[in-house]
Image (cartoon, helix red, strand yellow):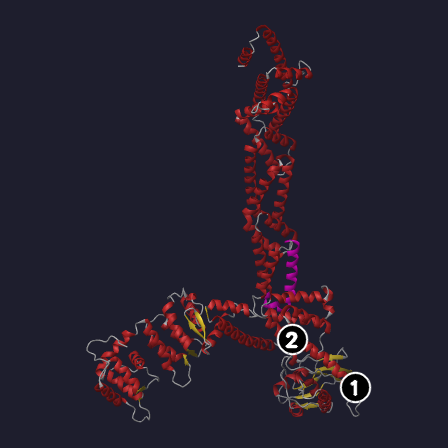
Amino acid sequence: MVRKLVVKLRNASERPAEAAEVKQSQRQRQRDTLREAVRAIQASRDTPATLEELFSAVESEVQDNEGGALHALLGEECQRKAAEEVAALAEGVALNSTTFLQHVVRLWESYSSQLSLIRQVFLYLDRAYVVSNPGTLSVFQLGLRQLRCQLEALPHVHHRIVEGLLQLVETERGGEAVNRYLLKHAVDMLSNLRLYEDGVQDTLLQSASQYYMRESQALINELELAAYLLHCERRLAEEFDRCEAYLGLHIRKPLKDIIDRCLCEAHLPTILDGSRQLLAGCQEADLARLYTMCARIGALQGLRTVFRDYIRAAGSGIVLDEHKEQEMVPRMLQFRRDMLSVLQNSFSGHADFTQALKEGFEACLNSRADKPAELIARYLDSILRRGSKAGAQEGSLEDVLDAALALFRYVQGKDVFEAFYKRILSRRLLMGRSASMDAEKLCISKIKAECGAQFTNQLEGMLKDIEISQDIMAGFKQFAAARPGSLAMDMNVLVLTSGFWPSYRTFDCLLPTELLKAQQEFAEYYLSKHGGRKLAWQSTSSNCVVRAHFKSGVKELQASLLQATILLLFSEADSLSYADIQAAIKLEDSELRRTLASLCLAKERVLLKEPASSDIGAQDVFKYNAGYTSRMYRVKINYLQMQDSDEDSKKTNEQVLQDRFHQIDAAIVRIMKMRKTLSHNLLLGELASQLRFPVGQASFSDVKKRIESLIDREYLQRCDAGYEYLA
Amino acid sequence: MKRRRPAGVTSPRAGSKDVSKLDGLFDAYRDKESSEDVIGPEGVEKLCKDLKVDPTDRLVLLLAWKMGAQKMGYFSRAEFKAGLSELGATSVAQLRKALPTLATEVRHPHTLEQFHRFAFCFCLTEPGQKIVDTDTAAQMLGLVLPGAPFVEPFCEFLTEQKDYKKINADQWNNFLRFSREVRADLSNVDDNPAWPVLLDNFVDWQRARMQE
């Protein structure tokens, strides 16, 4: 075959006969030298002529238009060499992958370095011939092409290379160290031979996909979620590292996709399911990992749903726990703090997740009607009673209030809160239990910001009453001091505007003359200043300090007005019967029993009773307990009537309910007047947006009853479309 | 208003002869002791006896409806005459023959609705009364809609439940609709979310019973 080509060339240059003959032989020699040189280079021997000579030989050949022949010659030689090498390689197919790849890489290294030397020698061929003949391969490419052809001609060798490569990569994935140098060069070779991108890369990705699919299936059940997430993250880093080290950067993206798909997406339900536990443990770092992962695979909505549902479920657990009602608000606050921290630190405060947090808390706080609102009001009470001391543990008082009101914001039954807050505030103010007026004002201003001025109107009025009362008392004291014969009694009167304060039950009873006189004196003073007003004394909300002499010494008893009235009776007599007391103070029977019980059956027994049974009978006799002892100088006697019993909270709830009925009626009429006709569901929808409290499933039948009542009262009638307004 | 009548019944546009016959018939049952011109409970009972129907029979209620009777147990002269002439009857015998046609007439949904509404008003005996106690309502329902879907369990429910002692016109009227629209297995009860709470409660009660 070689000779045939040469003959052809000779024929082509046969016109100037003799000169040609000479030249021909010269060229033949030159070409033989070149061929010899190529072979020498390929065999890593010294070339027969210096490289410079060879270079000029090539130059002259090409200038004589012999480039094509030269090119063909090179092709032949490379083909021969490549065939030789690949055949040698084929013998090692049975070797283990590392050794085999070592052979491959050795082959490649020598072949490519030889080739580049050849290219240098044949540089002129590249520059002149190849450039001017489009479609011809450059010297280097020609060499590569031959090697590639040879490899393709022996597919089992080719496959063995790929297989070896995959095997080593897999070994490395399995955690063993491999010779990365080998891999890099093998990849290099394949890529130079244009075998990598087209075939090998896909196989590589496929094998990665299989590997990770297999792995994830095993690990997802075996590992804890946190460890699994960590593993995914590590895998991704490893693959990136691998790409950088030898697989090539362009394969990064598909590899990342494979990891995302096999390790994450394929197990997303399991992962999201397990993430509840991460949330429960507030594992912020793991959650952050999960968040990044979900962001990568576009599964944030799923994570968001899990977040919301978790808050709803866990929060409802707290809210519905009736045994730990007292701790509900602190527990919810802690829960919210945890979730906020997760939101910030793990979910980078993403807007969707912020919304999810809000939805979750709204759902759980409203999973139980009204009670959370009541408990938040009570919690605020405990804070405001302790004042700045309460804040000391958990940041400033303001922060504590803010947190509690943030919970309040989620609650739909704001009217319940208002009712309880008002009731409790009134008690705090009247009993002087509030730690600081500034804190009270701060709290109310926050509620105001939340619910509007109308909501806090009465609450502010209450605070104002207390402040004005201080001025009034200052004035009264001057007035009293200037009056001869005035009582030397320390008295403090709070003047309350009746509309602002909750109504209390009042009991008629005969007060001791001293107290009556003091009341009269104050009334005289007050009415002289503010003519036209009416003063009504609230006996149940008053309290007194009574000084009592016991054997163990003098004590100050802090008691309610009714208790004090009874106690004062004992300054005249040591023993009084029930009937005596009844006659002296003319208090309603049940209230008298209750008050007496608080004096002789409760913790501080300043009175003794005969017989010593556990309830008050009409025949009982009461005695001053001379032997009473206490560690304290000032003793507080519990006020039974002021205790916020279940009955009290029931009453407040009933009152709220009644208010709601009126509001529902009014809203329905308002809506129907505007709409004329409306279907049931649309009416409910409009109601929900108009009312300040929830119209959920629980109160569903309440609303229906209101509608029925309105039908009954002929505000509405039924029609085919639903309801119709009757003008 | 022309209605189909069975053959052999004379025309309602009866002459003055017929009118005087009706007056005569009315006077035969009229409560002589009453200052008002009415047939009282005793007269009604006598009429029923002559018609050979039980006074608690549905037909009597239908007759009252036909007459447009305002008050239970009483027929005024005008009501009596209008009702009978509409039925084309001038004698007890004719009336007896005409009665069964009423039962046919109320099979028409629209007519039944009128009859159903009438029955509720018919129970309101006191001036200004707007509600009927549940026992009366249950009995009445049995008369008005015998054999209609849900009537039996609903009547049982009415007597059993404690939330309502009386029912109003809205609840009464809605029951007919309920009986017509809701399937026996209650599967489509939520198609109309606006059922009165009484009926919602009934649905719950009935479901609980069906589960047993």
State how far apart marks 2 and 1 are (Cα): 32 Å
User: Would residue A413 be seen by someone viewing this image from the given angle?
Assistant: yes
Mark 2 residue element: helix
What's under tag 2, amino acid-wise? Answer: Asn
Of all residues, the one furthest to the front in this rendering is: A16
Estimate the x, y position of residue A459 in percent, counting from the top left: 66, 75
User: Would residue A627 be seen by someone viewing this image from the given angle?
Assistant: no
Q: Which mark is residue A478?
A: 1
Q: From what the image shows, is residue A40 above or below residue A332?
A: above
Q: From what the image shows, is residue A395 above or below residue A177?
A: below
Q: Which residues are magenta?
A: A319-347
Chain hosting mark 1: A
Estimate the x, y position of residue A417 in percent, counting from the top left: 61, 72
CB within 8 Å, label 2 to label 1: no
Instruction: Identify the main secondary structure in magenta.
Output: helix
Circle 1: is it few (<14), some (14-19), or many (20+) Cα within 10 Å?
Answer: few
Identify the residue under disc 2: A457
